[in-house]
Amino acid sequence: QQLEQKVEERTAQLTQINTELEAFCYSISHDLRAPLRAIRGFTEALAEDYGAQLDEAALRYLGRIRTNAQTMGQLLTDLLSLSQLTSQPLQPVRFNLADLLPPLIDEQRVRYPQLVVNTHVARQLMVEADRGMMRVLLGNLVSNAFKYARHDAGLELELGQIEQRGEPTIFLRDNGTGIPATKIPTAFNPFARFHNN
């Protein structure tokens, strides 16, 4: 009875934490949109009204502000989507994981048009999982692969499957800058970062 009570108490605590985290994500993503829209609006107005008086460097800085504001807007959208996604029950279905990769790569090619990208994707990677969650997972991995690619070497991206301990294991491999060996123990901590950009 004591064990069951502890399990129930722990479950209640985790439920409360998840509820608070979801509310926090919603609040952050919602409340930051107004000042973000103001930043974008004023930079656009500045470029339109005073663009002729600004030199090339100033116009480039304005462009960077707009680009980063757009990126932050997308991050807020992704944060809200993730909070909503993780609050829903998983819906595992059987599908080919390889089908998710091409559109995710196409999305990143638009952001990094100068990057030379070679992909190697296994034809059949059948999994039974929640398709939406797997798209979020692969999307983050692909985004990081592009973000931390070494532009002098191009990006090599491979999605495949190997055997580990007698079990099939799916991997997404790239030739980017990677994670320092000293940081590997904390690699999967929430919000952990290992690079400045």
Image: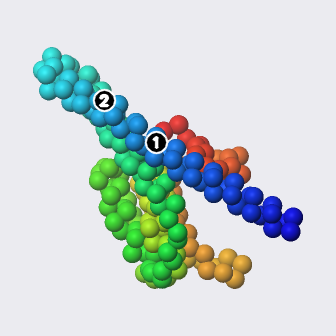
Query: Which residue position holds label 2?
Result: 39
**Could you tell me how far apart the alpha carbons at marks 1 and 2 are, in whole angstroms?**
19 Å
Mark 2: give few (<14), some (14-19) or many (20+) Cα within 10 Å. Answer: some
In front: label 1 or label 2: 1
Q: Amino acid at mark 1?
A: Ser
- In the image, residue 40 sits, relative to residue 144, either above or below, namely above
Of 32 and 147, which appears nearest the observer? 32
Q: Position of residue 189 (x, y in %)?
A: 65, 50
* Disc assigned to residue 135: none
Mark 1: give few (<14), some (14-19) or many (20+) Cα within 10 Å. Answer: few
Disc with the residue nearer the chain's start (1 vs 2): 1
Secondary structure under tag 1 reads helix
Secondary structure under tag 2 reads helix
Q: Position of residue 101 (x, y in %)?
A: 40, 68
* Disc assigned to residue 27: 1
Of 5 and 93, which appears nearest the observer? 5
Query: How are the residues colored?
Result: rainbow
Identify which residue is drawn at 71% across, 51% down. Answer: 185
Q: Amino acid at mark 2?
A: Ile
Identify which residue is drawn at 81% across, 67% down. Answer: 4
Q: Is residue 82 visible?
A: yes
In the displayed orientation, state which residue is furthest to the right: 2
- Asked where in the image residue 104 lies, by quadrant, the reply is bottom left
**Label 2 near label 1: C-beta < 8 Å?**
no
- In the image, residue 182 sits, relative to residue 1, either above or below, namely above
Q: Is residue 159 visible?
A: no
Q: Position of residue 106 (x, y in %)?
A: 32, 61
